[in-house]
Amino acid sequence: MTAGVAGIGSSANPNRVIRAGNPEGPREETSLLAFLSILLANRRVIAAFALAGIVIAGIAASIEADLFVSRAAFIVRGARQQVQLPGGAAALGVALSAYSEFSQSVSFYADLARSKGILRKVVDKEYMTSASPTVKRPLAKVLGIDDPDPEKAARLAVQRLAPNVSYTISSRTGVVGLIVKEHDPVVAQQVNANILVEVDRWSKDEAHRQAVREREFIEQLVADSRARLAQAEHAVKTFLELNRQYESSPELRLEYARLNRDVTLRQQVYTSLTETYEQARVEEVRSPTLINIVEPADLPVEPQRTEALRTTLMGLAVGLLVGMIVAILRQRVDEKTTA
């Protein structure tokens, strides 16, 4: 009886791992050898996906293999100091929220460089080519757009140019890298340089318009503050005319003190707003440069064939990975089917 119990105990090993569907122990398919056998059994599928990846990536890379890449870099300087209203004006509920500074973020200017408004101004300029370095033509002509309508030709040129303009933003330094791709290296360099010029011009014009709006708004505040101060002073004058012996009455003394505080507060607000108005006038005539060019647009020497090779190899890697995943899924389906 004891031997029988011992025999039962020896056959029921408590340390043995039992998996569902496989009472003999660990699944063999999870081992490296089983994985390699799956890949070998589905080698044609994997090879087909790898070949498809090479073909797709190769076609995409061949389109850009002959493109020249011009690179430039710029940084966005801190916005000009916004005109601040004095504390007294804030206490009276006066604010400049409706006239707050326009966006000066790095991402804003990076997107601005690719906007249709900027690209349209770039397209309207004339360009030289490597083949004709002394002759300037509209960009639409350079890109081979021969539409007789200049307006339509310009729109088509913008559509053609937009996919070839991109940017990168350094998360560490905030430097914006501007990238322009074209079949002609000279054209790529000129387009890149003109984009920088137009972005800088837009920022200066917008800064000036903002300064004008602020100056006009503060000018209205000054006029209103002057009127309020005159009203408070008139109230003190009227009180003194009607109450020449106010010192003998506690209530009249309190009223006089209140009127005096009102005059003092409005005098402080008026003085501060006048100073702010003078600051706004100075800001209006300034021409701040918000775009600092770190690297001017360079002249590319050779097309991006190395990038095309890298893209093709990436397509091969993606194709192999997809093929392996499909092979493993097929193996699992076959297991469930034969089970």
Image: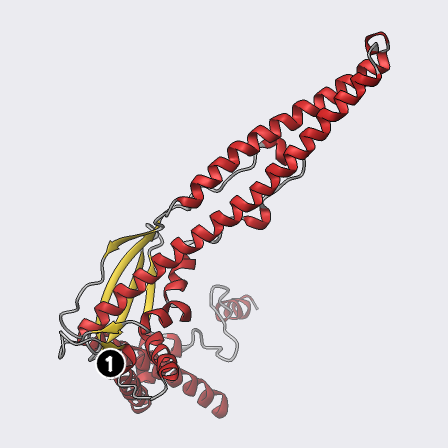
Q: Is residue 279 above or below residue 61?
A: above
Residue nearest the viewer, comparing 263 with 62: 263
Residue 83 located left or right of residue 149: right
Residue nearest the viewer, comparing 200 with 305: 200
- The answer to whether residue 91 shows anywhere in this view is no
Q: Position of residue 225 (x, y in %)?
A: 64, 34
Give the quarter of the image for residue 50: bottom left
Q: Would you call the spot at circle 1 few (<14 residues within 10 Å), some (14-19), or many (20 or more)?
A: some
Q: Amino acid at mark 1?
A: Val
Residue 134 located left or right of residue 100: left
Q: Residue furthest front?
A: 241
Q: Is residue 236 above or below residue 101?
A: above
How is the model colour-coded? secondary structure
Residue nearest the viewer, comparing 326 with 168: 168
Picture residue at 23% right of the left edge, 83% below the top: 62
Q: Secondary structure at mark 1?
A: helix
Give the quarter of the image for residue 307: bottom left
Q: Residue furthest top?
A: 248
Q: Position of residue 259 (x, y in %)?
A: 75, 22
Q: Is residue 321 above or below residue 10?
A: below
Residue nearest the viewer, comparing 126 with 23: 126
Give the quarter of the image for residue 321: bottom left
Picture residue at 50% right of the left edge, 72% below the top: 18
Picture residue at 13% right of the left edge, 74% below the top: 134
Q: Position of residue 301 (x, y in %)?
A: 13, 70
Classify the position of the N terminus by image quarter: bottom right
Residue 304 located left or right of residue 280: left
Which residue is tagged 1?
Answer: 142
**How many numbered discs sit on the rendered protein?**
1
Q: Position of residue 251 (x, y in %)?
A: 86, 15
- The answer to whether residue 118 shows anywhere in this view is yes
